[in-house]
Image: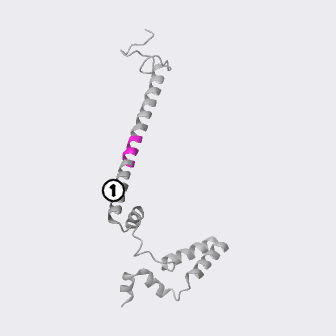
Amino acid sequence: MTAASMARENPARHSREWTGPSLPKPAWIAIMVLGFIVFWPIGLAILGFLLFTGRLGSCADSCDWVSMKSRMRRGPSTGNAAFDEYREETLRRLDEERREFAMFMDRLRRAKDQAEFDQFMAERNGGGFAGGGPNGNGDSPNGKSAAS
């Protein structure tokens, strides 16, 4: 097996070949902590080295974030297919209700903001807030001012 084929297969394994023998994980962690204590760029450099070489553990194969997120959301299987199906349906329904409620709250906020803006514009254009009419600016419903 050539070095290039090994690099394609597992880059962390290939990088360990050219970095020499490996210390156990606790030793590398201790060296990194000491590096941070002495001078933080040294600790940062050691951390970068450990992540680049995969000495702290590589998640190249096991870190599929999308499937991990879905597994965390679903939770572990109980072994009871009927309950798992019920739980999935309930979680889906709750998620849909949460989205609908968020849209309702957004519409409510927009309506409140619009009412406040209309009131501000009425005060600004009308020279003050009289509060006498149903429009909130002292006008009667037919559009004529209460003063005329």
**Residue shown at 59% from the left, 82% from the top:** 27
Residue 103 on the magenta segment: yes
Q: In the depicted view, which residue is nearer to us: 73 or 43?
A: 73
**Residue shown at 47% from the left, 87% from the top:** 17
Residue farthest toward the bottom in the current orientation of the protein? 1
Say if 75 sits above or below 18 in the image.
Answer: above
Image quadrant assignment for residue 136:
top left
The span shown in magenta is 98-105
Q: In the depicted view, which residue is nearer to us: 112 or 104?
A: 104
- The residue indicated by pointer 1 is 89
Image quarter where the N terminus lies is: bottom left
Residue farthest toward the right in the current orientation of the protein? 38
Image quadrant assignment for residue 24:
bottom right
**Residue shown at 37% from the left, 48% from the top:** 97
**Mark 1 residue type:** Glu
Residue 20: image location, x then y, percent: 52, 88
**Residue shown at 45% from the left, 26% from the top:** 119
